Each structure stands twice: as C-alpha cells, then as structure tokens.
Amino acid sequence: MQRLILFINIGTLALIIILLFRTFISAIKYNTPETIYIHDTIYKKHSDWELLKIAIIWQESKGNSKAIGGNGYGIYQITPIYVKECNRILDTIKYKHSDAFIDSLANDMFEVVQNYHNKEKCPKKAIKLHNKGDKYYQEVMDKYNMLKYLNDK
C-alpha cells in the first residue's frame, strides 16, 4: 500500500512539473516559449484560475502545443468555431485557426471567450464553455482539484 501511495505521489509530481513547464510558464506567464524559470514553477502558488486553465490544457492536449484532434489545434484544442467566436467578440479578424498552435495566442483566445461569456470566472461555466460534455467536466474538475490540493500544500 505504501509503495502504491509513493508511486501515485511521484506520478502526480511528474504530471505537475510537466504541466507547469509546458503550459503555464511558456503560454500563460511569460508569453514566450523559450523562457522557463524553474524556481517559479516549483515554488510559486498559482491562482485558482491558472490551475483551472492548466487542468483544461492537460485534459485537451497534455500540454502539447502541436496537438491536433479532429479540427482542434494546440494546447486548448481550439476549433475554427472557437476562433470565429473570438473574432466576433473582438469585432475584428485578429486570429486564425493556425494561431492555436502558438501557446500564448491560444491562451489569449481562451481568455477572450472566457472574459466575454464568463466574467465572473466561474470554474463550472469555464469548463462548460470550453466543452459541454458531462464526462469532460468531471475529468477536468478531477485534475483541477488535484492541482489545487497540491498547490495549497
């Protein structure tokens, strides 16, 4: 039993490190994929919103900027309809679908949609806006709760 708990804890720590390196630092915090600061990823406390975005990214692409799933691209698996909604909200053609492969632009698109439709940053609404499935919602919430637990330690 102790070995199982140790294995789960090591796996969880590895997941957190991968998520923080691939997504949060490059896409969200610094907006440049080349810049990684180890002390910030390990020791910084993250906001609930940042943790939720990391959970969504992990569910969508495991943090893979080059991920393609059907017509979804990048870390958030952004679709052409999502891009169209961003441009509609902004009332200009700012984004194209291929921008979803650029972490910082994918994050910007995510924030545009969320800030317009979910000003209060409600986690449930954020997840449902991104993907309406009940199973998807539960899987993201499981990841979010794990990240929140580890972040609060």
Image: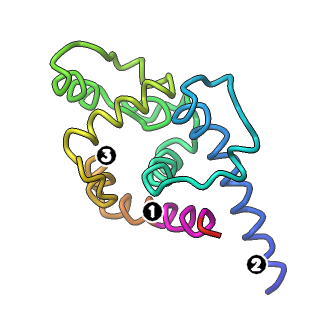
Q: How many labels were placed on the picture?
A: 3
Residue 16: in magenta span: no
Q: Which residue lies furthest to the top in this view?
A: 93
Q: Kindly state the secondary structure of the residue where label 3 is placed.
A: helix
For the C terminus, the image quarter is bottom right
Residue for point 73% across, 36% down? 37
Residue interval drawn in magenta: 142-151
Q: Residue type at mark 1?
A: Glu
Q: Residue furthest right?
A: 3
Identify the main secondary structure in magenta.
Answer: helix
Q: Which mark is residue 5?
A: 2
Could you say where residue 50 lies in the image, as x and y percent from the top left? 48, 49
Whether residue 40 is situated above or below residue 108 in the rendered picture: below
**Residue 26 horizontal/vertical position (percent):** 60, 31
Q: How crowded is mark 2: few (under 14 residues within 10 Å), some or many (20 or more)?
A: few
Q: Which residue type carries mark 2?
A: Ile
Element type at mark 2: helix
Which quarter of the figure has residue 71? top left
- Nearer to the camera, 24 or 64: 24
Spatial CA distance of label 3 from label 1 is 13 Å
**Residue found 70% across the figure and 32% down from its top:** 36
Kind of residue at badge 3: His
